Image (cartoon, rainbow, N blue to C red):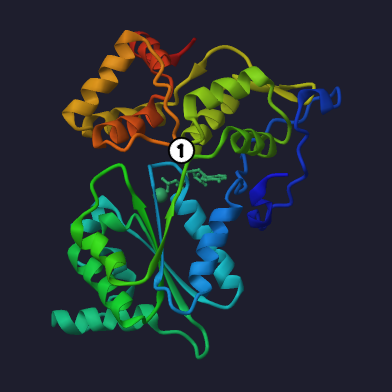
Amino acid sequence: MPHGDRCARGTDMPEAPTTCADTHPFSYSIFVNLLWPLIGRAEEMGVIESALQAPDTSGVVVQGAAGVGKSRIAREALQFATASGSEIRWVFGTSAARQLPLGAFAAWVGSGGTDHRQVVRGVIDALTSAPEKSDVIIGVDDVQLLDDLSTFVLHQIVASRAAKVVLTVRTDDPIPAATQAIWQRGQFDQLYLQPLSRDETTSLLSVTLGGPLDPDAVQRLWTLTRGNVLYLRNIVEQDVADGRLVQQNGCWKRTGDLVLPPSLAELIEARIGTLPTPVGDVVDALAVIDVGCGHDDRQRDATPVHQQVALAALFFPDPSGWARRSASGRQVSR
Ligand SMILES: Nc1ncnc2c1ncn2[C@@H]1O[C@H](COP(=O)(O)OP(=O)(O)O)[C@@H](O)[C@H]1O
Ligand SMILES: [Mg+2]
């Protein structure tokens, strides 16, 4: 049974068979819109929920690589808190909003007044006010992308304990000192989100697709994504839409080579452009000499370059496959 089932609120999901042998000899209809219920995060949800319930904590910081599931778990935890009567605010940092002072909090900026202190005070009041006896929880997604004034607003809220705060932070890029100061200032619990394990990935696939996958399809998806749900979702949805992943007699099978969806390929290309030169060189070397990384995502080497290579390896979990992809456009074949 998937760990996160209690979190899959709103989805009436039948339990999926776990092996192809368990299935009946007829085909299910093809899903047009796949639902991705939260899987494998029961323990992590527990960490966030206890941080929100403990009277002396300021909140929780959810850290991890891009695509690992930070925004999803933070949203699920906040939704859960709404059900228990908390007032929720959800804010997200973006590169675009960062250009604008208080960009992330635009919805809470009042119309009158030009005095900066008054405007900031007004935003804090609007964010933290709630009906009597309700507590306020503010979720800030990708907090490292907030503009300076929005970061200052959060500092003030944490310092005055006016609300609890759930922050998500991408660890792929350096985190600004002013952002780190938010959780250094308060009593925050830290949650370092890891990719899903292979078993969790397999469960997620069979529950989402409504039936088991054959071991070859699971192996390829695991090799390509190593539990990064963003990549998994991109690849699977594209494969189902293009008819490369099909259900035959109740069992999902791959037909033809996996193809990297354009959106994912662009993400990878954008990411490689941001890698520091030594890291990019190592990734290039790994791809060209056609060897496996042999890394374990859950136990990364402590040295900075190796850490970053491990992050890069999330994009290229199978460097030999990437070498072939590079040689033949977007096609990934083994
Ligand atoms: N444990 C999970 N179970 C099911 N789907 C997930 C899980 N974690 C993430 N997802 C889905 O994967 C995608 C990427 O997750 P997201 O939270 O946006 O990653 P991040 O914020 O770390 O970049 C989203 O579509 C999200 O709904
Ligand atoms: Mg996110």
Which x, y percent locates residue 115?
13, 83
Image quadrant where residue 197 sits: top right
Image quadrant where residue 211 sits: top right
Which x, y percent locates residue 98?
22, 57
The residue at 31%/58% (across/down) is: 143
- From the viewer's side, name the closer residue of 149 and 62: 62
- Confirm whether residue 267 shows in the render: no
Crowding near the residue tagged with mark 1, few <14, some 14–19, many ≥20 C-alpha atoms within 10 Å: few
Residue 98 left/right relative to 79: left
The residue at 40%/31% (across/down) is: 314
- Confirm whether residue 215 shows in the render: yes
At label 1, the amino acid type is: Arg
**From the viewer's perspective, is residue 299 above or below residue 282?**
below
The residue labelled by disc 1 is 298
**From the viewer's perspective, is residue 258 above or below residue 6?**
above
Query: Where, quadrant-wise, is the N terminus in this rendering?
Result: top right
Q: Helix, strand or loop at disc 1?
A: loop
